[in-house]
Amino acid sequence: MPTLETPGLILRDITEADFSAIHSYGGNIDNVKYMAWGPNSEEGTRGFIARAVEMAQAEPRVNYDFAMILKSTGQLIGTGGIYLEMDWHGRRFIAGNLGWILHMDYWKQGYCTEFAAALLRFGFEELGLHRIRSSCDAENYGSYRVMERNGMRREAAQKEAILSRDGKWHDQYEYAILREEWMLGHAY
């Protein structure tokens, strides 16, 4: 059960006690504007938490969902994770998919940039991944700037790749970074 720290955050496994904080943004339509899911009902939020708790116990663990806890107040302000992907031969985990959601009261304060940086470090240093990718709605400037600030490069702009809740198609950006690229920016 890894616990990670950044200058402003503690990242820990999600627990059932996190329901109220998670539902406060997961159930808010404005907060999930760019997400493929939501807004969650209470049952939907409880289901997400139950899956995160269950996946944290899996062997081998392939989904690392984290609660973002603000160090200064102890408040849970978001969740996200890194989700492992196996090579085509099913031999080993070589890549990860990174994602997050942050309560809108904390947008534009650098927390997701810190979160993504911590998960990139965890993925490359602790999990030994070769590549980490992430994607977002092309209109989600905040998310793709988080990726760019962490050295990820845009690899694709996919036309009408996301079907939104309102039935409209949205473009999607795909970003990625290789272990070697990440290490160049983090020489010790």
Image: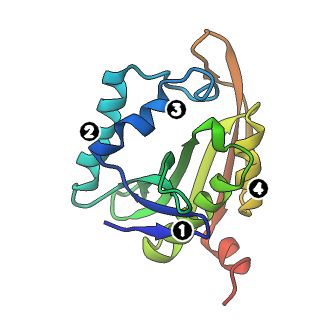
Q: Which of pointers 4 and 1 indicates the residue nearer the eye?
A: 4
Identify the residue position indicated by label 2 in the image.
Answer: 50
Identify the residue position indicated by label 3 in the image.
Answer: 25
Q: SS of the residue at dot 4?
A: helix
Quadrant in which residue 92 is drawn? bottom left
Outermost residue toward the top? 167
Q: Earlier in the sequence, mark 4 or mark 2?
A: 2
Q: SS of the residue at dot 2?
A: helix
In the rendered image, residue 153, in percent from the top left (x then y), is placed at 75, 56
Left/right placement of residue 186 relative to residue 75 reads right
Q: Which of pointers 4 and 2 indicates the residue nearer the eye?
A: 2
What's the residue type where badge 1 is placed?
Answer: His
Q: Earlier in the sequence, mark 4 or mark 1?
A: 1
Q: CA distance from mark 1 to mark 3?
A: 32 Å
Identify the residue position indicated by label 4 in the image.
Answer: 148
Left/right placement of residue 174 relative to residue 17 reads right
Identify the residue position indicated by label 1 in the image.
Answer: 130
Q: Are marks 3 and 4 in contact (CB under 8 Å)?
A: no
Left/right placement of residue 49 relative to residue 172 reads left
Q: Is residue 116 above or below residue 175?
A: below
Left/right placement of residue 171 relative to residue 94 reads right
